[in-house]
Amino acid sequence: PGTDDRERRPSSGEFGPDEFTKLFQEAIDTVDLIFREGVDWRAFIYSFKKVQVENSETELTIQRIENKGDGVFIVRVQVPPEADKTKIHQNFTQTYQETLQTLETEYQEKLKIKDSEIANYRERSSNMTEVIRLLASREITQDRKFIKKSPLVAGKLVILKIIKGDFKTGFTVMLQLGQDGMLPSTEISGSLPPFPELEATYQQWKILYHKLQLPVRISGRKVNLFSSQDVCKDSAKLLEKQLKTWLKSEEFYPLKDRLQQKLNSTDEIRLILQTEHPTLLRLPWQVWEIFEHYPKAEIALSLPQYDQAESVNLNLPRTRVRILAILGNNQDINVHKD
């Protein structure tokens, strides 16, 4: 009343036989559940099922869900003509609000547990740091007999220099190969083609990832049809896929081919990526398929300019890598296998 919020039905033409009756019947045989600040679907499903059980003598079915924009949703529940619509609406509204409160309390408890775990981890990490310092300060003593019998650790050194360029124009690349600890014996130049989409995907993933670090509250005011973590994971998978595609490019193939010619699958390989480009230093290079062929390869990142550290003479040949400590969380992983 007093407004002109009328909309023609049907939108064009005229009603067919019984169409007006059906449209009018739909309006009076439904209970409209209106959400003005979004829907928490977890709470909705639980509440709707509970109302169905409490009103088992009444058939309740969701007719349709309408998104009106600005966080407003209308869920139309079809009911028999004789149903007590007021009771059903009140039951659902009360159950929904109680469920929201329960979820909020549950979430807050999880946050408290998480904060406690972080504090414990920091304390353990601090203690382990002292252990590492103690181990590192100990004098190295080894059995001379063992040293004579054990072969020296030998490996290959691969330096991938991405010298200049950007994602819009492409990059100039130089590859150096040689024995670890010696000057490179092979050097070959090449390039990586323009790929601005890769940088854009990285920026998108970074935004999504940082959003996961923000405190999130379960609230009916936010529409969360999809998990933020799933969206972030999908973005990460797209980033990995694009990086693999980029490293399979025709321009980069000669460098990859030379790598495969000079390296064996049993070699211990140190691959150093040198670049000044900030995005390149943050890409997931470990997904490069070259690491599938060389299981003993590892990658490190470096700037092109650096000062070489003075060599430390321990008066002992290097027989094997010394592991001082391993820090981490063993939750949901196979520690023995890893």
Image (spheres, rainbow, N blue to C red):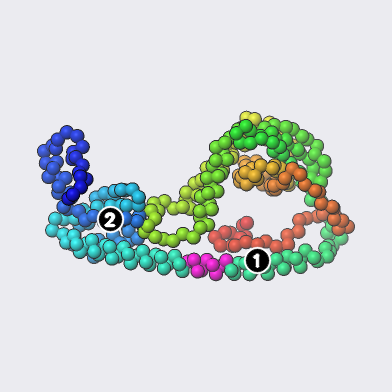
Q: Residue at x 53, y 52 (%)?
A: 209
Task: Assign a secondary structure to mark 1.
Answer: helix
- The numbered dot on residue 57 is none
What amino acid type should be assigned to the residue bearing mark 2? Ile
Residue 212 visible here: yes
Q: Residues within 10 Å of mark 1 (few under 14, many from 20)?
A: some
Task: Assign a secondary structure to mark 2.
Answer: strand
Task: Please state which of the two labelled residues, at mark 2 or mark 1, is closer to the viewer.
Answer: 2
112 horizontally vs 317: left or right: left
Q: Is residue 113 magenta?
A: yes
Q: Main secondary structure of the magenta part?
A: helix
Rounded to the nearest whole Å, what is the CA distance between mark 2 and mark 1? 50 Å
Q: From the viewer's perspective, is residue 155 above or below residue 102? A: above
99 horizontally vs 265: left or right: left
Percent position (x, y) of residue 137?
A: 80, 65
302 horizontally vs 234: left or right: right
* Residue under pointer 2: 34
Percent position (x, y) of residue 81?
A: 14, 55
The image quadrant where one finds the C terminus is bottom right
Q: Residue at x 51, y 58 (%)?
A: 214
Judge by depth and name the residue closer to the eye, 224 or 157: 224
* Residue under pointer 1: 125
Q: Is residue 215 magenta?
A: no
- Give the magenta-colored segment's residue range: 110-118
Q: Residue furthest top?
A: 250
Percent position (x, y) of residue 147?
A: 84, 57
What amino acid type should be assigned to the residue bearing mark 1? Ser
Percent position (x, y) of residue 276?
A: 69, 42
